[in-house]
Image (cartoon, helix red, strand yellow):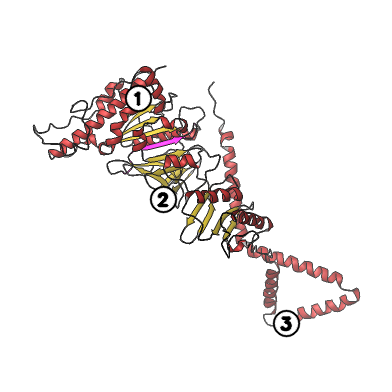
Amino acid sequence: MARRPLPRILSSGSAHIARSRVMARSAADSATDVLHPLITITRGLRLLAGAGRRKWAATPKDRRGPALFLVGAVVLVVALVPYGPLLALISVMAVAGWQGRDRTPARTGPGEAELQRLRSLYEALVPYFSLPEDPDPLFAHGGEWEKAFDEYEFDADGRLTRLRVSYPPYFMDGEHSSRVRIEHLMYAKSGRGREYLFDWDEEGNELVMSVLPPLPTGIAAQRFVTAPGETVLGFTDADAVRRTVPVREGDGTRDAPPVLWRTGARSTEPHLLAVGRPGSGTTSLLRSIALQALAHGDVVIVEGNGTGEYASLDGRAGVLAVERGLSGALAGLEWAANETERRLITANRARQSGHAVPEDTKRPLWLLLDRPSAFAHVAVADGRPDPQELLQVPLRHGRAANVTVVVAEQFETLDALSETVRTHTRARVVLGTATRAELESVLGAPPHTIPTPEIPSGRGYARLGTGPVLRLQVPATPDPYDDATSDAHRSAVLELLPDRHTATDGTAATAARAPEPAPAPDPDPGPPAQAQAQPQPRQQRQSPAPMPTAVPAEG
C-alpha cells in the first residue's frame, strides 16, 4: 500500500518549533549581554538593601534614634554640597556594581574526577614509557604526572578532549606497532565511542591526542562547483585540505572542505576502488559519482547485485547501459575495451598526421562496476570468461583514452577481485565499520585516528595514491525509487538526473550518440609513435560500434 505523506502541520511543525526555540534562546542571550551592567547594579542594590536591613535589625532600640539623626545629617550635608547628590548617586552605583559582580571562583585546574583520570592514564603509560636503566625517569609509578602532561582539556562530562604528552627520547616512536599500542591504550583510558586524532612529533618527543568532531551527514547530492575532471568523493576535516566548495545543507549554504578526485589524461590516480560492508554506502558513492560524471561524459554501469539500485539512471541521456546480467556485462565491457582501443588508435593517427585529436576521444567515458565479483561463479558455471578480464585494457590505457573505471566491492569478496583491478585502482575508499588492519590492507597506510565501532552510512576513509589518509563523509545519494528515501533526498537526486532518451530503441539512441569517424590517415603513416604503450586492437575499425542492446538478466 502506498504511503501517504504526513500533513504539513505535522511534518513541518516540529521544525518550526525548534527554530522558534533557537530564535528565542538567541534573543535572550543577546538581551542578557546588553543588560548585563543593569543586572549587576540591581543585584548589588539588592545585596546592599539586605545588608542594611540586617544592620538595622541588629541595632539596639536605644541607639536607633541617634543612628537616624546621623544618617539625616549626612544626607543634609550631601544635599547642600555642590554636585553632592550626583556624586552620591555615582558612589552608590559604584558600590552596588562592585557588590553585584559575579563572584564565582574561576576554575584554575582539573577537578577531583579529572585528576583521577590523569593519574590513571599516567600510571597506565608507565610500562611503555620507562626503562629500569633510566636514572631520572619521566614516567614512574607514583611519579609526577604534571611533568609528562603539558596541556589537557576536558568536556562537560569530565572526559579528555585534548592532551599533550611528553615521552622519553628512547621510546621507539618510529615503529608502527609501538605507536599503535600507545594509541589504543589512550583511546581506552580517555573514553570509547569518540574518534581521536593522534599527532606524533618525533623531533620534539611529543604526542598530541585530540577528539575530532563528527563529520556532517546533512549534505545531500547536488551540483558541486568543480572544474571538468574533478569529482567530489565526499567531505572531510577543515584542516585536512586547502580548498572549500559551497554546499547546501538544510535551509542554508556554507563552505565545506571536499575530497576531490581528479581524473583524465593528467591524473595520477585515474581509477578508484571502494570497499565496504553491506549498508556502508558504497552504492551511494557510485550513484554520486555517476551523477557528477553525467555532466561532462558518458556512463556504463554494471550492477552485480541485481537489486535495481541504479534503475533511476536507466535510459537517461549519457547513460549508455545499465547491465545486471552476465551476458549484458560481458557485452558492455567488451564494447568498452574496443572503444578504449579505438580512442588510442584514433588519437595516435591524428597526432601522426598533424591534426588535432578528435573530440569524440576527449569525452570522458566512465565504467562503474558494483560488485563485479558476483559474476565470477556464474561465468565459471556457464563456461564464459570473467567480466573482470575485459577490464585490462580500460585499466591499463584508460588514462590516455579518457576512460575511468570505478569498482565497488565488499570486504567478504575482496579476494575475488583480479590482480589487474587491485593494481591499477590506486585511489581507494573504505566505508563503514572496519578494523585498522583492514583499513591498512586496502588503503596501504593506517589512518591517524581510531575508528569508532558504530558509524553512519557513507562515513569512512579515503586515500588518493600515496597521499594522506583522510576522513570521508559521502554526500547522501540514496535510490530515489526506494520507499525509505526521504522527500528531500529524493528530490535532490531527481533534480540531478538527465532527461531520458527520446528514441524508443536503446540501440538506435546509442547509435545516434556515436561520434563521427575520424579522418582517414595517410596511406603510409609510418611506425606508430606509441606502439609500445598501446595494445593491438582486436578489430580494426574507424568508428565505434554502438553499444549492444542490453540483455535481460539471467535468473
Callout 2 environment at 10 Å: few (<14), some (14 to 19), or many (20+)? some
Q: Looking at this view, is 516 or 151 the one in front?
A: 151
Residue found 43% across the figure and 27% down from its top: 309
Residue 380 pos. (x, y %): 37, 20
Q: Which residues are magenta?
A: 267-281
Residue 318 visible from this viewpoint: no
Residue contact between numbered discs 2 and 3, judged by CB atoms under 8 Å: no
Q: Is residue 266 left or right of residue 378?
A: left
Residue 279 pos. (x, y %): 50, 32
Q: Which residue is mark 3?
A: 80
Residue 241: image tag: 2
Kindly state the secondary structure of the residue where label 3 is placed.
helix
Residue found 86% across the figure and 71% down from its top: 58
How many numbered marks, from 0 up? 3
Residue 119 pos. (x, y %): 64, 57
Q: Nearer the viewer, mark 1 or mark 3?
A: 1
Task: State the separation of the CA atoms marked 2 and 3.
Answer: 72 Å
Residue type (three-letter) at the residue carrying disc 1: Asp
Task: Confirm whether the magenta stretch covers residue 271.
Answer: yes
Residue contact between numbered discs 1 and 3, judged by CB atoms under 8 Å: no
Q: Which residue is mark 1?
A: 386
| Rendered position, 249 above or below 495 | below
| Rendered position, 503 above or below 202 | above
Q: Nearer the viewer, mark 2 or mark 1?
A: 1
Q: Looking at this view, is 108 or 160 the one in front?
A: 160
Q: Earlier in the sequence, mark 2 or mark 3?
A: 3
Residue 110 figure quarter: bottom right
Residue found 34% across the figure and 28% down from its top: 388
Residue 244 visible from this viewpoint: yes
